[in-house]
Image: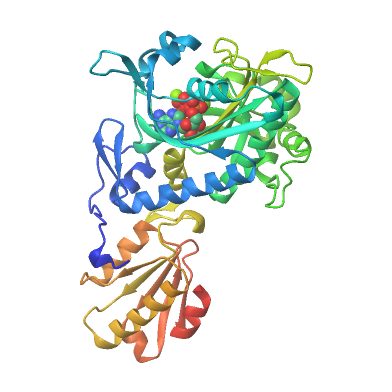
Amino acid sequence: MRLSRYFLPILKETPKEAEIVSHRLMLRAGMVRQEAAGIYAWLPLGHRVLKKVEQIVREEQNRAGAIELLMPTIQAADLWRESGRYDDYGKEMLRIQDRHERDMLFGPTNEEMITEIFRAYVRSYKDLPLNLYHIQWKFRDEVRPRFGVMRSREFLMKDAYSFDLDQESARRSYNKMFVAYLRTFARLGLKAIPMAADSGPIGGDMSHEFIILAKTGESEVFCDRALLDLPIPGEDTDFDGDLSPIVNEWLGSYAATDEKHDPAKFEADIPEDRRISARGIEVGHIFYFGTKYSEPMKAVVAGPDGTEKPVHMGSYGIGPSRLVAAIIEASHDDAGIIWPQSVAPFDVGLINLKSGDAATDGTCEDLYAKLTAAGLDVLYDDTAERAGSKFATAELIGLPWQLVVGPKGLAEGSVELKNRATGEKQSLSVDSALARLI
Ligand code: ATP
Ligand code: MG
Ligand code: MG
Ligand code: MG
């Protein structure tokens, strides 16, 4: 992509309304724009990152055996009357009437709808276990939308729903999602710690929140430092095998959100130097809630003996839009964002220090063509801006590599390759710079 033809509305000034660094940087880097309180447009740069996050989430859901579908954003109120949640959900639910005065709503979550789909088609234990997920916009009329896309009213969620014949099998489904989440957050360059959590209005008795430690986090959390160094299950993990040793290793160390915190146990079990008491960002949440929805909504399956029983369910959420902000909270410096390779909007920023100079333009065009042909996403700054401003933009948008080409270097046959994360700069020949990147 040539910057001269791209849409990257960088802000020179720091927006006053943004209280936390990720919100400031997302606005300055032209990633999002607020269209109404807690409602954002994703501009091209932000959209690229969001799609990358979404894709990693999708790959790990698929790896764990979950199956993607897509449910609508608008739901019929009657579905929620069946579960009893239409009245319980309160003001966070955006209620709408259509032209026939039928009560509708913008889905804040999809337990009811997925239960309706399940009961329409599945009758036998032979079709279980089953896990269905979608990645879809949700709306929650948050009392205090803030921090940009961290707590917005419209936000993207991956929500998966598992169906099992009994609790034991539901536990296995829960473990699959638990391990998939560990892998997902690690691939996003994050250390997310599963913590015992309250299940809130979704209900249920087994529940973990995945939390990223961050000063700006809204949750108060407590955990054993040892959790920060536990290994992440590899790509070769057998999701059909027994995952309980992995899950038990993670659940073996203390980790709890404030609702579940037990100060006496925390102090008795963990040596002082390992006690972390900090703030955190909830990026994922998994629940087992048994027959809470299947019972009132009559989603039943026949077991091996022919008797019908309500199916056991769990639900598993991740917020890709919140994650974009959380990744920035975890990875930035004074100059801007530092994207982990896996979600970077482009792989390389190619900086032409003197557009219009024949030799510089020629080398840049050649590098741009070769890097692109090798499958890399390149943002080529071919604009007429000053060098200083080009560097500032490159630092702000935080691409993993900056490849800087100018007439001075070229006279000596060299270009400069800078690693955004380490700040390390190397003077290299054009060929070795290419070899380094490809
Ligand atoms: P919170 O405690 O932050 O309000 P929640 O517990 O209400 O979140 P869940 O119902 O568990 O959220 O939803 C699953 C995931 O969806 C959360 O872990 C989070 O990543 C994301 N999410 C929830 N609410 C929002 C929001 N207002 N803005 C952005 N992402 C959100
Ligand atoms: Mg909430
Ligand atoms: Mg919560
Ligand atoms: Mg939650």
Q: Is residue 10 above or below residue 222?
A: below
Q: Is residue 195 above or below residue 204?
A: below
Q: Position of 251 compared to 390: left or right?
A: right
Q: Position of 142 compared to 160: left or right?
A: left
Name which quarter of the figure residue 140 lies in: top left
Task: Give the percent coordinates (x, y) of residue 91.
Answer: 35, 14
| Residue nearer the viewer, 368 or 396 | 368
Q: Position of 11 compared to 107: left or right?
A: left
| Residue nearer the viewer, 385 or 225 | 385
Q: Is residue 414 visible?
A: yes
Task: Give the percent coordinates (x, y) of residue 3.
Answer: 27, 65
Ligand 2 falls in quadrant: top left
| Residue nearer the viewer, 52 or 298 | 298
Task: Give the percent coordinates (x, y) of residue 318.
Answer: 51, 36
Q: How is the image coloured?
A: rainbow
Task: Give the percent coordinates (x, y) of residue 139.
Answer: 37, 27
Residue displayed at 38% across by 29% down: 73
Name which quarter of the figure residue 398 lies in: bottom left
Residue displayed at 28% across by 82% down: 361
Q: Is residue 234 above or below residue 410?
A: above
Q: Is residue 89 visible?
A: no
